[in-house]
Amino acid sequence: MTDRFHGSPSGAVTDVQNQLLWLPKDSKQDLGKWVDWQGALAYAKIMNQVYAGGFCDWRLPTKEEALNFYNETLVNVDWEKTQIHIHPLFARGAAHYMWINNINENGFAMRLNLRDGSVEHIDKSTSEHQAARLVRSVR
């Protein structure tokens, strides 16, 4: 499964299995700070305005896309140099929590833990250790 991700001339990473294009860095790596839910949405807006990777339709991943992004057999390292399970093509030093485009009935936002693959809903105002990792469909 490690060969499903490929670099592209734009610098983005293609997931050929799921027909997705991912930015190689998350918002923590780009902005140098953690972001809450609104900050994640604002980061997507900025990346769309600057045509990151040559595109203007970047967004937060769905739950399914995020769960497919995580792979316990892959090894990379987060900002604390702790193992996270994403492809090594992605920049090292990412956040270990990734916002997902899902809000529950109580208004909590979903996040994925890239260290263990767990998913949970948390308060949207939480920022510490949270980052946005943007994706777009190539279909």
Image (cartoon, helix red, strand yellow):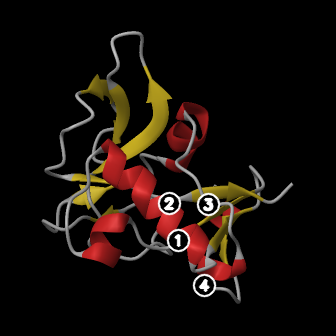
Q: CA distance from mark 4 to mark 2?
A: 17 Å
Which element is circle 2 on?
helix
Q: CA distance from mark 3 to mark 2?
A: 6 Å
Q: Is residue 117 visible to the viewer in this orientation of the structure?
A: no
Q: Amino acid at mark 4?
A: Gly
Q: Which residue shows up at 22% across the image and 28% down it? A: 123
Q: Amino acid at mark 3?
A: Trp
Q: Is disc 2 in contact with disc 1, using a CB cutoff of under 8 Å? A: yes
Disc nearer the start of the sequence (3/2): 2
Q: Which residue shows up at 25% across the image and 59% down it? A: 83
Disc nearer the start of the sequence (3/4): 4
Q: Which residue shows up at 45% across the image and 71% down it? A: 88
Q: Nearer the viewer, residue 131 or 90?
A: 131
- List x then y, in percent, for residue 71: 48, 47
Q: Amino acid at mark 2?
A: Ala
Q: CA distance from mark 2 to mark 1?
A: 5 Å
Q: Which residue is mark 3?
A: 58
- List x then y, in percent, for residue 54: 70, 81
Q: Is residue 135 above or below residue 65?
A: below
Disc nearer the start of the sequence (3/1): 1
Is residue 5 left or right of 29 when viewed as pictured? right
Q: Is disc 3 in contact with disc 4, using a CB cutoff of under 8 Å? A: no
Q: Which residue is mark 2?
A: 44
Q: Residue furthest top?
A: 105
Picture quadrant of residue 108: top left
